[in-house]
Image (spheres, coloured by chain):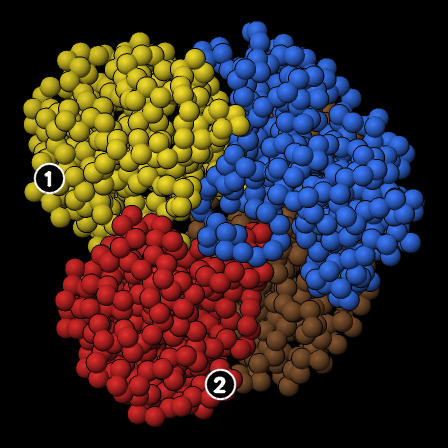
Chain colours: A red, B yellow, C blue, D brown
Amino acid sequence: MVKAAVIGASGYAGQELVRLLYHHPEAEIVYLGSRSLEGNPLSDSFRSMADSDRYRFRASNLRDAAEEANIIFLALPHGIAAGAVDKEILQKAKVIDLGADFRLRSLDAYRLWYHLDHPGGSVFDSAVYGLCELHRKAIAPARLVANPGCYTTCSILSLAPLLAEGEIDLSMPIVVDAKSGVSGAGRSPGEAFHFPECNESLKAYKVGTHRHTPEIEQELSLLAGTQVTVQFTPHLVPMNRGILVTAYCRPNGKAEALRIEELYRTFYADEPFVKILGKAEGLPETRWVRGSNRCDIGFYYDERTGLLMVIGVIDNLVKGAAGQAVQNMNIISSLPETMGLTNYAMFP
Amino acid sequence: MVKAAVIGASGYAGQELVRLLYHHPEAEIVYLGSRSLEGNPLSDSFRSMADSDRYRFRASNLRDAAEEANIIFLALPHGIAAGAVDKEILQKAKVIDLGADFRLRSLDAYRLWYHLDHPGGSVFDSAVYGLCELHRKAIAPARLVANPGCYTTCSILSLAPLLAEGEIDLSMPIVVDAKSGVSGAGRSPGEAFHFPECNESLKAYKVGTHRHTPEIEQELSLLAGTQVTVQFTPHLVPMNRGILVTAYCRPNGKAEALRIEELYRTFYADEPFVKILGKAEGLPETRWVRGSNRCDIGFYYDERTGLLMVIGVIDNLVKGAAGQAVQNMNIISSLPETMGLTNYAMFP
Amino acid sequence: MVKAAVIGASGYAGQELVRLLYHHPEAEIVYLGSRSLEGNPLSDSFRSMADSDRYRFRASNLRDAAEEANIIFLALPHGIAAGAVDKEILQKAKVIDLGADFRLRSLDAYRLWYHLDHPGGSVFDSAVYGLCELHRKAIAPARLVANPGCYTTCSILSLAPLLAEGEIDLSMPIVVDAKSGVSGAGRSPGEAFHFPECNESLKAYKVGTHRHTPEIEQELSLLAGTQVTVQFTPHLVPMNRGILVTAYCRPNGKAEALRIEELYRTFYADEPFVKILGKAEGLPETRWVRGSNRCDIGFYYDERTGLLMVIGVIDNLVKGAAGQAVQNMNIISSLPETMGLTNYAMFP
Amino acid sequence: MVKAAVIGASGYAGQELVRLLYHHPEAEIVYLGSRSLEGNPLSDSFRSMADSDRYRFRASNLRDAAEEANIIFLALPHGIAAGAVDKEILQKAKVIDLGADFRLRSLDAYRLWYHLDHPGGSVFDSAVYGLCELHRKAIAPARLVANPGCYTTCSILSLAPLLAEGEIDLSMPIVVDAKSGVSGAGRSPGEAFHFPECNESLKAYKVGTHRHTPEIEQELSLLAGTQVTVQFTPHLVPMNRGILVTAYCRPNGKAEALRIEELYRTFYADEPFVKILGKAEGLPETRWVRGSNRCDIGFYYDERTGLLMVIGVIDNLVKGAAGQAVQNMNIISSLPETMGLTNYAMFP
């Protein structure tokens, strides 16, 4: 039985984690940390859980959590985990960090995109990038897993087979036009997410500067064996959950629909959380993955233009955050990878 | 293991039922019937289910279903089940009808409100009204259970303790102002539910004529031991799921908040799916029950006006339809009543 | 030409006022005051206006505004206008206050409901309640107009004819179940109005304590010539604009639909902004008044229960705030009452 | 005074046209044609208009309309206008066609993309493509104007200056990732637009096959003086109105932000309905153009990738349909081009 701690448990990713862990047959929540809600019962901020008054937020303290838990989930703003996770903690507990501090393998890239220094060191070096479908083997023995970002997960899964197989002409940057529901922006109120401001409206934001860009490039470059450049543009869509990525790239050769479908089906054979949609099944829609840990992927090769479009969808809070974190927990705990993650999306 | 058939499986209630049964540890789906989708795989209309192509819709045929299933769920328009369920079927399988045909115990009331004739007879006489919290004992041995309506469930649960305890001055009709998300209207497209028509708008509908009215009155009257009159007004709210009922009534005596809370807590003691919100917990909101089988109830006694307000919320597709149907299945199958229904609401 | 000042111009009511005044053929905006945005161009917070950079927010200062404007609109939190409007200001300019400080004619009621003291005095005494359809004659010569609240306007207009004609049995409190879009909560971010918190959810709030209650009662009592008690319950609906009021009352005698319709049509004969919906026209929906200054009213008398339901809708920012303020401006400026307010609702 | 007929007046574009014409100081509606609603008052389908019962739908008959009107607006499904507009009609009235039949100058392209034959002929030859900002001079004397599509208008306006100035390296197809609110799909109910199906979800559709593609390419090619290839991908967003286009292209040389801004400001100098957003103003959002005839355009040049992003927004029913149609009416009627179109967007 995993004894799990969640630090930063009051945000959307934290609470989704609590929901998934609560129902997980081999996990037990032993510590919920929240700086802002210390002392309050969980039910104050998450009234869905009928008996959640038996949980109470404690201090957002890793060292305390490491005394009671054997796996600690961190759902903290970037810049905090980098300094807070140390060898001593990792000796007592494994850490799955839903934040950004251990995702980029290059400290220079971190400094450039996050405008923050990073201590680096052996803890940093020991971190494994937790995109389960790509790094399962490296994740299994890790004590520190960097859970990928939401846009990142969807973008990488959508493009991985093409880059791994050298199908893309990299002289054209891969265009990743991504759209997300508002829960991706977190639970802190602000004018941009005030209901009447973002309801019934649509916008692009952080064009050219969004911090998931280097993460996508890092992983796609690893797969391609050469530097991959991505033009990543996020958009805010008036709905609660869901990410849809529309990627545009130029294939090296002809990208007949059937061959591409085959390539994806082979690459993701036996992956329980990736579903490839063939021509008969239409294109992915976020409603079909809402609440599930699945990533649906479809594609269209346009002979007219010579471009290949890949469309992927996930639930940003599940496969894009808490679900993948539980999937990582399962991997590092030698549990079946799908345990606690088999529920279907709720529709509508 | 329950062998379950769902007839009318392609609508919202039907599909929610499929989702719940699929995850239910003691149920197996053996028959999915749909008139409009006969022959198609389930995945065509419910793409959430990754492996749903292993299910295929068959004819909407009770007799066939009764050969394979021991419990048949009906999710059909009113007027069909009345003639289709007969003794022979009930000998082979138990039936849980999510439609309206066996809910009203008075055939006259049925004819008056539904403008349809009803054959009545011994099958009709054997039906039990399946509001689990009120009729658990009668449901257990039944072979035909009439699953309550969505508005009905929320309205009755919200008011039952007051009527059972004779707290209401019945000379004033009880006002039940109810609001529902759009999935309550079903899955058939029509101008009223075309996105741009109902998004960003609000309306009352079927004022004074909605067919859940006699159902609410029937049950409240039973509890009160005398005729109860209800003024029921439904409203359409631009959201997918959720019902909120605001009930106004005049207590016989003083209705101090604490005493009322106590009365509700006593009435619903040990009920796993009813949560009473005391003053500290605020009033119910539909978001906290979305996807769960729970009914949350809160109240406010206004000394200034002498009126008592009770506010109840449910998820119309779960406690208001498929969830309660599974709860009824558990009861008639001697399974733990909460089995397969313990998942928390997903938020947000 | 009216020279208009708007103090508190950065909120939703303030900006709607700016929009209406900008298009008004006989008004000119000469002063925009905002405490939080002093010095900024209007376009920073209201990018709809292509040339709005020619307006710049100035201090939220009534005395300065009174030097340049002959009509000052106040859109301020309650408690500020009470002390800020004085004789000197009223000598220089007329004031239309969109806030609550001059609406209640009883200082005791103000203190009770607002938990604030109020200086009262001759300025307070001179204020006229600005529900145009009821107080047009008193408004015309006024120098200080208290623009009604949003819920208030819709509730009073919906019920006025019944009380004026003595049709209601007042021994039963009038139940006013009201529902509002989120812009009614203002533009300040907060957890309750953070998109993922209120999207796809529904709740009642301030049950029994909402401050529009005494305002509704004051006006209905005036019409009835006796004390009227109202049970007012507001609800938050996930949409931007719109208020729908469902009122329940007990008529003194039989309330045949046709007679009631006639009574309303007579009461509101020649009112350009009130539309009575007869049986053929169905019931009001908020979409048909979005962006317009109209109030649509429909009704249903339920012979079965003896209750009469009246349903009214307005756009909370237009007839419920800025539109009615412009209507008041027209009245006190001897302009045609509909000037600048004739645009139809935009649909969808 | 323009005497205007609207044929196909019951859809969203048709009704928006009615709204704009109704408020237009120099237009009078003399004929409303609707096949499905012939005989019904306008108010049945457009209850916003308080006095709309004075209008009644007549047959969808161009010849009749041409007897009474001097300008006929067509808002019909494609394939109808091609055969219905003839010389005789054009002698009596000018026609502004909001449909697709006269937009493509190549009949082959029409047959290829619409899978329909087209009679062509002198009427077809006389048609002028009505994107006002580009073809104002040709529109002025025209008797048949092909009003551009919604996606088309936004895409072309967003990219026109770059192509006109030869700034784009055309060896990479221009990627146009477009997102639209649901009113763009029209008013006919269908499963895809049933509220619970498209609310809280996001999808791409008609990938590689959407019929606005050849229209965008036709106009951009004209501007570039060479064939331009566009990869156009539309997405459906759960909101009523608004289109946002995110275009990706590779500039020939360095595309410093300031130079590009200057180029756009010069190209659109004196255009009343195009607003260029510089760095300080942020990027376009659909909420700021809702209800207005404006197109807002912003951009970002990414030195890292060498790509230039252009983002444009319009209201699909105004600048994308009815508003531009009125703008065309003003041009061919020698009225000021902004007449009847100056209202600001309503916010929120």
Q: Which chain is indicated by disc 1?
A: B
Q: Position of residue A2 (x, y in %)?
A: 18, 68
Above or below for B53 versus C158: below
Report how many numbered discs are placed on residues in the image: 2
Q: What's the residue at 86%, 54% (across, down)?
A: C63
- The image quarter in which residue C260 lies: top right
Q: Residues within 10 Å of mark 2 (few under 14, many from 20)?
A: few
Q: Position of residue D277 (x, y in %)?
A: 70, 68
B1 or D3, which is in the foreground?
B1
Q: Position of residue D208 (x, y in %)?
A: 47, 62
Q: Position of residue B34 (x, y in %)?
A: 25, 35
Above or below for B338 versus A107: above
Residue on which the image places disc 1: B335
- The image quarter in which residue B330 lies: top left
Residue on which the image places disc 2: A116
Q: Quadrant of the N terminus of chain C?
A: top right
Above or below for D108 versus D62: below
Above or below for C45 versus B269: below
Q: Amino acid at mark 1?
A: Leu
Q: Amino acid at mark 2?
A: Leu
Q: Which mark is residue D34?
A: none
- The image quarter in which residue B299 lies: top left
**Distance (Cα) linking label 2 and label 1:** 57 Å
Task: Find numbered disc 1 in the image and state the secondary structure of the residue it sits on.
Answer: loop
Q: What's the residue at 54%, 21% (across, down)?
A: C173
Q: Are marks 2 and 1 on the same chain?
A: no
